[in-house]
């Protein structure tokens, strides 16, 4: 096949994805940027107000609370989810019956967030939930998980870590499969211990995979919404009021679409900054084979 024909087939094959990306990502993004500079309640014509919405966001106590809750959630979610996914992937990499275990760990990923949240509302129930029932066997009075301002963010973080564990685990498993066995054979000939092989071979060569998982985890953590909406409706008080919840609240409860769009743009900028920081820092710890 000639290069020109191959190029045409290539463009044809990526066209559906490209059209979807433009229609459902780039155009709404530009629309949100434009809307963030206006005052609009959904009726009539938007009024241009410049950067006033952005200034008001940083003076808004609700936005500050949402930002603090999101950062606290991210601090709990990101390192724990990466560590546990790596641990499970290492355990399953060469284990017997790994297909069954992979299915068990990955099954929650394909389950809807609403269903998962409803199930965990029962699990977290202070009176009949299985966690507090289990703790009671040891004489421990479990907390009122999702009704406590202290425990609500950790509770949502635990749910999310369990929910996304299978996704990150599969990525780590793919990364482990990509490491050539020749490195391990050479290390065994030199008498390297399993711990030394892990820190000198596995971990460095798995760093591109870890880097990808870290980026996806940051993006996922900043976009937490479904669990807080279904389980607590942002409460108790504003205990689980996150940035995406603030975007939703501004748009569909207060009908202040300009303010909502400005909060969404700020969220986008936060994610972009954290991603760029990760890319800048990756030069020091991400190692590519070859």
Image (cartoon, rainbow, N blue to C red):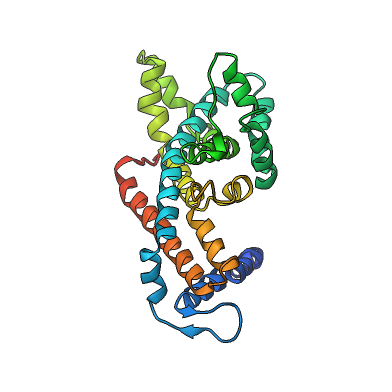
Point out the image quarter for the N terminus: bottom right
Location of residue 4 with respect to 209 vertically, above or below? below
Point out the image quarter for the C terminus: top left
Total count of labels: 0
Q: Is residue 156 left or right of residue 281?
A: right
Image quarter for residue 173? top right
Q: Which residue in the rendered view is the most extreme toward the left? A: 284
Residue 283, image x, y percentages = 31, 46
Frontmost residue, 104 versus 193: 104
Frontmost residue, 2 versus 285: 285
Location of residue 171 with respect to 262 vertically, above or below? above
Image quarter for residue 12? bottom right
Q: Is residue 5 visible?
A: no
Residue 52, image x, y percentages = 38, 76
Location of residue 34 with respect to 120 vertically, above or below? below
Residue 105, image x, y percentages = 63, 31
- The residue positioned 40% from the left and 63% from the top of the image is 60
Frontmost residue, 283 versus 215: 215
Q: Is residue 182 left or right of residue 159?
A: left
Q: Is residue 79 visible?
A: yes
Residue 4, image x, y percentages = 59, 70
Image quarter for residue 164? top right
């Amino acid at each position: 096949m000639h290069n020109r024909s191959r190029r045409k087939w290539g463009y044809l094959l990526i066209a559906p994805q490209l059209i979807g990306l433009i229609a459902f990502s780039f155009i709404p993004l530009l629309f949100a940027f434009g809307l963030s500079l206006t005052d609009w309640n959904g009726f009539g014509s938007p009024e241009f107000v410049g950067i006033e919405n952005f200034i008001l966001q940083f003076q808004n106590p609700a936005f500050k609370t949402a930002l603090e809750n999101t950062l606290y959630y991210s601090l709990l979610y990101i390192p724990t989810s990466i560590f546990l996914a790596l641990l499970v992937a290492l355990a399953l990499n060469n284990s017997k019956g790994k297909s069954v275990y992979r299915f068990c760990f990955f099954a929650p990923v394909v389950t809807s967030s609403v269903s998962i949240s409803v199930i965990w509302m029962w699990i977290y129930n202070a009176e009949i939930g299985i966690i507090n029932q289990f703790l009671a066997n040891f004489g421990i009075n479990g907390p009122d998980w999702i009704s406590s301002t202290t425990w609500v963010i950790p509770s949502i973080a635990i749910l999310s870590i369990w929910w996304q564990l299978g996704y990150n685990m599969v990525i780590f498993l793919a990364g482990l499969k990509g490491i050539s066995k020749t490195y391990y054979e050479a290390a065994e000939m030199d008498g390297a211990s399993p711990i030394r092989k892990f820190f000198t071979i596995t971990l460095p060569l798995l760093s591109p995979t870890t880097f990808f998982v870290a980026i996806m985890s940051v993006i996922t953590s900043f976009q937490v919404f479904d669990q807080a909406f279904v389980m607590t409706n942002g409460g108790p008080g504003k205990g689980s009021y996150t940035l995406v919840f603030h975007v939703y609240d501004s748009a569909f409860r207060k009908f202040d679409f300009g303010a909502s769009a400005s909060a969404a743009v700020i969220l986008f900028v936060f994610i972009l900054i954290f991603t760029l920081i990760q890319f800048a820092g990756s030069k020091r710890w991400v190692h590519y084979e070859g």
